[in-house]
Amino acid sequence: MLIHGLTGDSGTWFELAPWIAEHGYTVTLVDQRGHGRSERSERYAPEDLAGDLVETLPRGLDLAIGHSLGGRSLMLAADRLSPKRAVYLEPGWVIPDGLRITPPLRPDGSWMSVEELAVLLPGFSHDHLEQALRAVSSFDLTFLEAPTFPLATLLPPDEPAVPSLVVVADPSEVVPPQLQDRLQCAGYTVRVVPDGTHELHILHLEATKRALADWL
């Protein structure tokens, strides 16, 4: 199971998912509530998103991976879903002060072009820019309104519900060093991608694969 981040959708995994499938897995891609082809809602609380996972997915999956917002949802659902292993890619646990999410809209309210979006997302390939634009254009923008947004810090439990790998950027704002230390002492495995940034599976694909390889 692969769970995307905020304003994304299941298509964000178009490079990582085939690689995981090559290891013998059947890969399930999730569109979280308000994203992609999933339904819009009046509620986008963290527990709502986690509850959707619990209601729609089987218990005991071999592996569950969540990025950013997906890492928050997975963390809240892990004890009920009971995957054999959980992987958190830059999970959105500690929310940086002043976090803002600005949709790529022109002043007239129309969506930017891929070329315009490239200025905002340096380093993204053309394919990933097209994917990001498709995803955000189907995203329910009311998610970014109160009471859902701004997001609140949501710390993981003192002990992991299942064997858990946390893969973080260098440095990470959402899993800062002091939290990394606490997690390692509590039984989580923590790996840092050197010079990595928040979009690990997009901008640092090969390094992310190396971090995941022995967990597959």
Image (cartoon, rainbow, N blue to C red):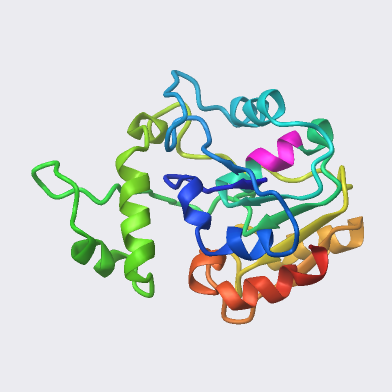
Residue 162 falls left or right of residue 4: right
Residue 47 horizontal/vertical position (percent): 64, 27
Residue 181 falls left or right of residue 198: right
Q: Is residue 76 magenta?
A: yes
Quarter of the view holding residue 25 = bottom right
Q: From the viewer's side, name the closer residue of 43 and 175.
A: 43
Residue drawn at x 27%, y 67% as measured from the top left: 118
Residue 37 horizontal/vertical position (percent): 43, 33
Q: From the viewer's side, name the closer residue of 98 and 76.
A: 76
Residue 26 falls left or right of residue 45: right
Q: From the viewer's side, name the closer residue of 31 and 50.
A: 31
Residue drawn at x 84%, y 38% as measured from the top left: 60
Residue drawn at x 52%, y 64% as measured from the top left: 15
**Residue 78 position (above or below residue 17):** above
Q: Which residues are magenta?
A: 73-77
Taking the view exactly as shown, the residue that stands out farthest to the bottom is: 194
**Residue 205 position (above or below residue 2):** below
Taking the view exactly as shown, the residue that stands out farthest to the top is: 42
Residue 137 horizontal/vertical position (percent): 29, 42
Residue drawn at x 70%, y 49% as measured from the top left: 26
Dominant secondary structure (helix, strand or loop) of the stretch shown in magenta? helix
Q: Quadrant of the N terminus?
A: top right
Residue 138 horizontal/vertical position (percent): 34, 38
